[in-house]
Image: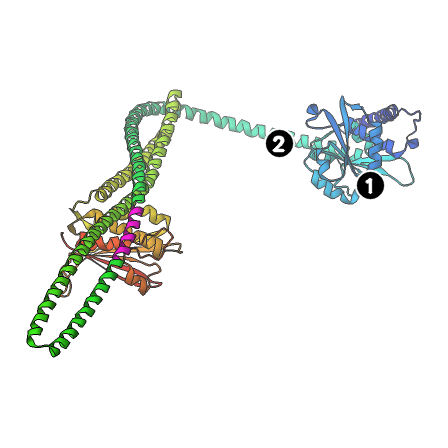
Amino acid sequence: MLSQAKRIIHNEKNHRSKVRALLIFFMVFIFSTNVVNAQQLDSNRIKAAYVINFIKHISWPNEKNKKSYRIALYKDQKFYQFLSRSLTQKTIKGKLVILINAQSINDLKTADIVYIPEKENAKLHKIANALRGHEILLISNNSKEKHDVMINLQQSNTAKTITFEVNKSNVVYEKLNISSELLLLGGTELDVATLYRETELAMQKTRQQDIELRAQLLSQQQQLTKSKKLLTKSKQQLSKSIKETRVQKIELKNLQQNVLSKQKLLLEQKEKLNSISILYKKTEQQLKLQQQVLAEKEQKNQQMLQRVAQNKKTLFSQNKKLAEHRQQLALQDQELVDRNQTISSQKAYILITTVLVAIAVFVSLLVVFFFIKNKKTTRQLTKTLAYLERTQEQLIQSEKMASLGGLVAGVAHEINTPLSIAITSNSLVIDDTNEVKQKIADGCLSKSRMSKHIEKVDQSLTMSEKALERVRILLANFKQVAADQVFDDQRTFKLGEYIEEVMMTLSVEMKKHHVDYQFSADDDIEIITLPGAFAQILTNLVNNSIHHGFENRTSGNITISLIINTPTNSEQDWAVKVIYQDDGCGMSKQVLNNIFEPFFTTKRGKGSTGLGMNIVYNLINQKLKGDIKISSEEGVGSTFEIMLPNSL
């Protein structure tokens, strides 16, 4: 074995001498000089010759796809000018050579070969780290950082000869292949010794691998005998598994029948979903029409508000005139009394009687005159009052339609979520069913896969059923509350359940403003009243809390309590008491005293009309024949107590 290694080293030395001769001849041919001795060449030409030979004896991973070799010279203008004159229109291994005069490290990343002059050795470590992993050959000059170099040119100050050393590990790390000729040409005796040591270590590794392979062969033979025994057992188990597969085929047929039945159920649910989507589209169209009607009514309401303001002004002026007339009558009466006293003292009883008759005639004429005038004023006031009542009814109706529009928008938003859940679960079941069909067609369906499919189908069906049930409940609540607000008819209903339905329709607006609510009841009670009016009262109270009570706050709480009333002697016989509370900013005494006044608002010019609480008061006292009390404290919240009779 040692003789063979010596023979290899001897052959390599011969080959090294041949390569050196070829290299000298090649340098002479490239630079077209008649001098053969390397000591007579200047350093730039020797470096250029080395760079060209490095390209010839090193191969890159993607060299076939390269159209040229890019050589970057880092901050070495003289060497760059020399190479640009020497390598113009030159080709190496059939490819052009392109030179880059690099002034920064980023300019080096696009090159195949990077040359660092001796004056820039302080930056060699930084440059080597930046170029690591880019498949770039790094050529340094007289560098002492041996762990960063790949090919390091060495030149002493006295001698003109230039040698180079190769750090093979760094070159291999960049996935570059070095020919043995270049390694032997640039290496020292120490490099050859390392090559010999590497070959000897490789031989030792092959011997060790041979021993390990033999040991593995023995173990494999032992395992082969064991596997033969296991094979006999597996044959026996195979016969059992054949019987089990027959049983599984029968079970598979039963499962296929179950799948077909589940698919029929899915198709039926799809049809139900389609019908629900058609209803949803119809409701959307109706909503658009109602929104248009609401917009028109809002314009009419604004016109009516202007007329009401004008009528208020006329009423105020007429009241002033009536007061002036009364003052004039009082003055005239006082004057008549004074005159009567003077006449009675000056004239006789005969004159007194004549004066009294004249006074009676005059007073009667005045009474007739003022009676006629008061009659005309009364007619105008009755007309104005009737007009105001009609205006109030129209305002209540417009508020009712506005709350109905908000109710419709909230229910539509709530329906979208369960519908999307049902559609998603059905699409998942369809995709999984198609996959199971494909596996049945391919004959590779397992029992575990089929059981997973059945579990998915059950889960999807339950999800779809819950989502559709949620849609059904929402639509039922919406139909009932919307019908109550459109048709103002009295009926018998459970007040607790109806409060829950109305608050569910308002849940979207409350969620948007982060408002929570709690409802409690001693016992659900049936009353005969107008559910539409009660729904409008609750809607106005919730909107008042959101827009006034919870203003400039991130969240809030609303509590509604239903208490069966036990009246005392001082109270009227009310059937039920509804207590509405919020923990908002509360009200001052001035606001609390004027809250039920029409057109009173704390947000004048910010979209508030000041009619919400006035409508609540009129609906409770006039339509529902009940009563309302308010208590509030600034910074704590407000409490509304609504007392209602058992029937109208």
Q: Nearer the viewer, mark 1 or mark 2?
A: 1
Crowding at dot 2, Cα within 10 Å, few <14 / some 14-19 / many 20+, comes out as few
On screen, residue 194 versus residue 337, left or right, reads right
Magenta-span inclusion, residue 304: yes
Asked which quadrant contains residue 592, the reply is bottom left
At mark 2, the secondary structure is: helix
Query: Which mark is drawn over residue 118?
Result: 1
On screen, residue 265 versus residue 362, left or right, reads right
Q: Which badge, 1 or 2, is on the more N-terminal residue?
A: 1
Q: Is residue 2 above or below residue 594?
A: above
Q: Main secondary structure of the magenta part?
A: helix
Query: Where's residue 501, x and y in %?
Result: 25, 46
Q: Say which of 597 and 282 sits in front.
A: 597
Q: Amino acid at mark 2?
A: Glu
Range of residues picked out in magenta: 301-316
At mark 1, the secondary structure is: helix
Residue 169, can we see it? no
User: Please, which colouring scheme is shown?
Assistant: rainbow
Q: Separation of disc 1 and disc 2 at Cα?
A: 51 Å
Q: Amino acid at mark 1?
A: Glu
Crowding at dot 1, Cα within 10 Å, few <14 / some 14-19 / many 20+, comes out as some
Query: Where's residue 520, x and y in %?
Result: 24, 54
Magenta-span inclusion, residue 331: no
Give the total number of marks visible in the rendering: 2
What residue did someone put label 2 on? 212
Q: Is residue 373 above or below residue 350?
A: above
